[in-house]
Image: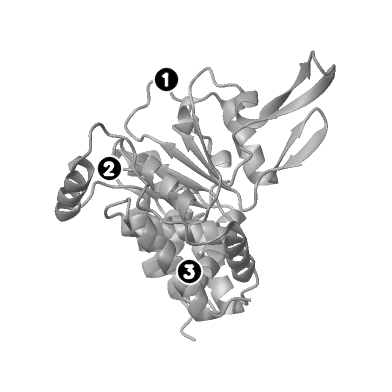
Amino acid sequence: MQNAQDMTQITQTIQSEISNAVIGQTQVVEQIIIALIASGHVLLEGVPGLGKTLMVQALAKTFSGDFSRIQFTPDLMPSDVTGHILYDMKSETFKVRKGPVFTNLLLADEINRAPAKTQAALLEVMQEQQVTLEGRSMAVGHPFMVLATQNPIEHEGTYPLPEAQLDRFLFKILIDYPQDKEELALVQHTTDHKAGDKLDVSRVARCVQPETILKLQKQAAALQVDEQVVQYAVNVARSTRSWNGIAIGSGPRGGIALVRAARARAVMYGRDYITPDDIKEVTLPAMRHRIVLSPEMELEGMHSDRILENILDKVSAPRH
């Protein structure tokens, strides 16, 4: 069992190494690490060119993990994701050709460009942590994390993820444009003595082993949570079902996601307990994809984050 100081040091080192490749986006990086410690998967949404792929590659390098990338396209088949069994003429035997899901960190780029059947193949692996080929079950890597990206402004030729499938992601993280000074530093860093726009993670050092991540995950899962704090998470999730302006509220997975993510945040900050503030800090990424706004709210340009902030303002948190 790691002590609190060790836990904080590990996560700070990972963040520091990622910052050697990724300029800014501090909150996004922190939320991704929280999801990793919580054994969760992440849906990254942002316009092209904001460093989503670079961020994932940098994270994979920090913990010596295996990294795979799938570029989702309309003609991508489920077997292109999970793998398949083929007959070898020379040996006259059937052999397994494993797909890119057999890794530690999988980047599913533009997941909404693939048809529902292919999306479902990936989402099944996310849920089961294994692949079944011709009746044979094979476990994927441990730790295993999927970071899927989608472009919010392109809808032509896309297959949006249904709400039931969105629910499989622990977090939906929105990546916004960088701040002025961050963008200046980004342009200088990317163009200084460099030709082309190849992603560069050479300055990111390997600082932890996959086994260390698994220990952090176990530590987060074993964290004791006060019943009042769990009740607070449940109250936040339940409030979305009767809140004015929300057509479809969160199911029980919403409360579960809040507690899992809050545990991981506590571990990240070197604590062996979670607070109501941990619940508040993870509510937006954990809940924004679990609610559907009413048509009236969407016409008014209301964003789900604002509704969730209103809920946090109204739902009373335990004080002790």
x 84%, y 20%: residue: 93
89 horizontally vs 116: left or right: right
Instruction: Identify the element where label 2 is drawn.
Output: loop
x 80%, y 27%: residue: 134
Q: How is the image coloured?
A: one colour
Tell me which label, 3 or 2, sits earlier in the chain. Answer: 3
Residue behind mark 3: 10
Residue nearest the viewer, comparing 251 with 268: 268
Tell me which label, 1 or 2, sits earlier in the chain. Answer: 1
The residues bearing labels 3 and 1 have C-alpha atoms spaced at a distance of 42 Å
Residue behind mark 2: 300
Tell me which label, 3 or 1, sits earlier in the chain. Answer: 3
Residue behind mark 1: 157
The residue sitting at the bottom extreme is: 320
| Residue 89 locus on image (x, y percent) | 79, 13
The residues bearing labels 3 and 2 have C-alpha atoms spaced at a distance of 44 Å
Q: Hey, which quadrant is residue 44 in on the image?
A: top left
Disc 3 or disc 1, which is closer to the eye? 3
Q: Is residue 164 above or below residue 245?
A: above
| Amino acid carrying mark 3 in the image | Ile
Q: Is residue 308 visible?
A: no
Q: Hey, which quadrant is residue 155 in on the image?
A: top left
| Residue 290 locus on image (x, y percent) | 50, 49
Q: Residues within 10 Å of mark 1 (few under 14, many from 20)?
A: few
